[in-house]
Amino acid sequence: MKTATRTVRLLSQAQISAQIAQIVADHDGAREAEPQPHLDYPPYRSSRLRFPHNRLQPVDPHEIERWSPCFGNQDVDPLDADLTVAQSGAPIGERIIVTGRVVDGTGRPVAGQLIEIWQANAAGRYLHEGDQHPAPIDPNFTGTGRCLTGADGTYRFLTIKPGPYPWRNHDNAWRPAHIHFSVFGTAFTQRLVTQMYFPGDPLCALDPIYQSIVDPVARQRLIASYAHDLTEAEFATAYRWDIVLTGSRRIWLDGGDDD
Ligand SMILES: [Fe+2]
């Protein structure tokens, strides 16, 4: 007996881009500033089953925090901010410095913040069982790091520039190179997550996650600046990216994202 097979046809990039353009056109018509992403955003197909469809329910934060991760100053080693030295050899790729300040809406520094990052390697591959696409794993690169902000709110990482990777949202879909950031807050229930992108990446224009922030000014805040004044000769190029937690220049800070 012949078994019926169901073929799921992925949308093309042109179809996804047309959806993105239509949402932008609708937004321009509404003329509202929208610094945060649309949660109900059809071009980001895998989010359709994940975004909240019901009103959020208040819960007791103290009860959650009793069981949540926490940290102290002694838990974070300064070497945790160097993603190039954790293994026995040097990782492959373009060595980069990523640094900036965490500030509130008035520009005041937010000191002592736990900043965690995770990213793909130079070939666009995560060291994660969920990532099986045919790009090489780098045995000398885990793609994870953390640090505490200093008294002036500054964080600094030394890492490898991540590569773009395919993600099956639609046919021939590629995520722009990016680094995931988590800002812990003072307790786990305050944790915020976002992504940093690199200047001049042509994939940003095609990416439904990046484009889910329809306000172009707000979108631009997720792109780091190349910082030649911070590059180190014969060693590493540098990017500067500030994280603004509140106010009108607040960057997109979401509850979490796996892509
Ligand atoms: Fe990612």
Image (cartoon, rainbow, N blue to C red):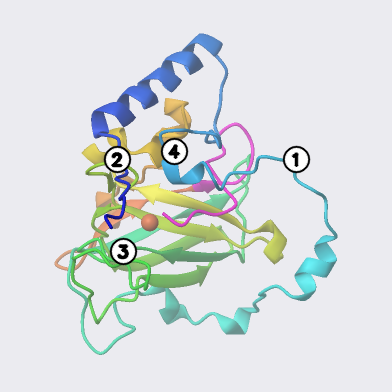
What's the residue type where badge 3 is placed? Ala
Q: In this view, does 199 lie above or below 194?
A: above
Mark 1 lies within 8 Å of ligand 1 (Cβ measured): no
Observer-side mark, 1 or 4, equals 1
Residue 249 quadrant: top right
Give the CA distance from mark 2 to mark 3: 24 Å
Can you identify the residue that label 3 sits on? Answer: 120
- Disc 3 packing (10 Å; few <14; some 14–19; many ≥20): many
Tag 1 near tag 3, CB within 8 Å: no
Amino acid carrying label 1: it is Arg
Say which quarter of the image contains residue 94. bottom left
Sequence-first disc among 2 and 1: 2
Mark-to-mark CA distance, 1 and 4: 28 Å
- For the C terminus, the image quarter is bottom left
Q: In this view, does 93 lie to the left or right of 247?
A: left
Disc marking residue 10: 2
The disc, 3 or 4, on the residue closer to the chain's N-terminal end is 3
Instruction: Looking at this view, name the residue that lies furthest to the left.
Output: 234
Question: Where is ligand 1, by quadrant?
Answer: bottom left
Amino acid type for the residue under numbered disc 4: Arg
Whole-percent x and y of residue 187?
71, 65
Q: What stretch is highlighted in magenta?
A: 243-259
Residue at screen point 64% across, 36% down: 247
| Amino acid type of the residue tagged 2 in the rendering | Leu
Few, some or many residues within 10 Å of mark 1 (<14, 14–19, 20+): few
